[in-house]
Amino acid sequence: MSLRSFLKSGHAPTLFSAFLYFDLSFMVWVLLGPLGVAIAASLHLNPAQKGLMVATPLLAGAALRLVFGVLVDHIGPRRAGIIGQILVIAGLSLAWLLGVRDLNQVLMLAPVLGVAGASFAVALPLASRWYPKERQGLALGIAGLGNCGTALSALFAGSLAKAFGWINVVGLTVLPLAVAFVVYLVLVRDPPQRPPARTLAQYVGVLRQPDCWCLMALYGVTFGGFSGLASSLTIYCNAEYHLGPVIAGAFTAACMFAGSLVRPLGGALADRFGGVNTLVGVYGLAAVVLGLASFHHASPVLALAPLLAAMMALGAGNGAVFQLAPQRFGSEIGVVTGLVGATGGLGGFCLASTLGVAKQLTGAYQPGFLGFAALAICAQAALLILKGRWRFALPSLAGASVPATVQESRA
């Protein structure tokens, strides 16, 4: 399949706009992490407060993903995206104009940043529904590369804060968001066919099935670990290895880029070896490297290796979980996607806040890392149990090679 034929099969301007919207929204969602060193110094925050500060937008994003999923169902993804972008631009502009003077006011930004994190629920259906089923995987892969926006924040926010002050960085982010908003208004068109709106009864019905809770928990560990580390690594590198915000941001950006880029690889490995088999390996690797990352190393370069490996393992796990979801819940995949996506943000909140609390109570980040490594081991054990049950009821989930599943949730 040529790129030209792929682009002609859908609506390329909408696909590009969905990627740009997703990318810059994710940049904003984790903004407090790269700015955390400067904010903490300005407001005299302790480690637990720093952990809460970077974790709260992840929790808000988790809840708002469900809200925006419902909006997409009822008013269409284009209008839902317009509403989300207006709220984020207005909220950041107001924070910049009025100023942020204490932790409570910082936390008031969390819902605004959470709206940016909820862009997942808008951008992916906006991109995929324009393309035929056999090409939705590529469309979602392109739109889903917006995960790399987290690295943009880590790469540039620290140096901009050093030059202009952290509160002005909050205002400066409005500029690229405004450009993306104009592009969105001009280029985006709603897909010609809209699936029927999901009802509350559908959500409740799916939640009665244990396998739904299993998938939610699995994604809570993979995307939770990825987003939690993305929000925390700049503060961690500064506190543990005394790196300046700019260098710490560069370390964080390297980890985020690596974790984002291997997400499609996780899906491909799941297609080849089976989602369960892939995730068993992913969780085992994540547990080992998170355990190694928990120790204080002789240099930040040595510390970077296990952190980079952890982000890559968790990023691959994100793709593998969404390879399992449409196989297990083919007719209910829209509902399951919303629920699973929401628990990813919840897991990020748990990791980021736990790291801060561990540092506050024990003087070290190690208990927080080891606690999340233990969760990865628990997830691996649960998968091995599920594999035995699925081997008979759902052999495609437990088996080795399965055909590529092209569904909206894949990215």
Image (cartoon, grey):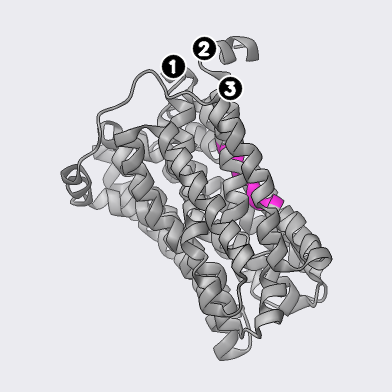
- Nearest the camera: 190 or 127? 190
Viewer can see residue 225: yes
Residue at (75% x, 74% y) in the render: 238
Circle 1 Cα neighbour tier, 10 Å, few/some/many (<14 / 14–19 / ≥20): some
Image quadrant assignment for residue 101: bottom right
Q: Nearer the viewer, residue 106 or 242?
A: 106
Bin the neighbour count of mark 2 within 10 Å (Cα to Cα): few under 14, some 14-19, many 20 and up. Answer: few
Q: Are marks 1 and 3 in contact (CB under 8 Å)?
A: no
Which residue is pictured at 51% across the width and 16% down the height?
Answer: 10
**Residue 272 x %, y %:** 51, 32
Residue topped by disc 2 = 9
Q: Main secondary structure of the magenta part?
A: helix
| Residue 364 falls left or right of residue 387 | right
* Numbered range of the magenta stretch: 144-152
Q: Is residue 278 visible?
A: no
Q: With respect to residue 25, does 95 lie above or below?
A: below
Whole-number angstrom distance, CA of label 1 to CA of label 2: 7 Å
Distance, label 1 to label 3, CA atoms, is 16 Å
- Residue type at numbered disc 2: Ser
Which residue corresponds to mark 1?
132
Q: In this view of the protein, which residue sits in the foreground, 265 or 352?
A: 352
Pick whichever of labels 1 and 3 is earlier in the sequence. Answer: 3
Q: Residues within 10 Å of mark 3 (few under 14, many from 20)?
A: some
Q: What kind of residue is marked 1?
A: Pro
Left or right of 127 in this view: 398: left
Which quadrant of the figure has residue 31?
Answer: bottom right
Q: Which residue is mark 3?
A: 13
Q: Secondary structure at mark 3?
A: helix
Judged from this view, the residue extending furthest toward the front is 97
Image quadrant occupied by the N terminus: top right
The percent position of residue 41, horizontal first and vertical second, equals 71, 81
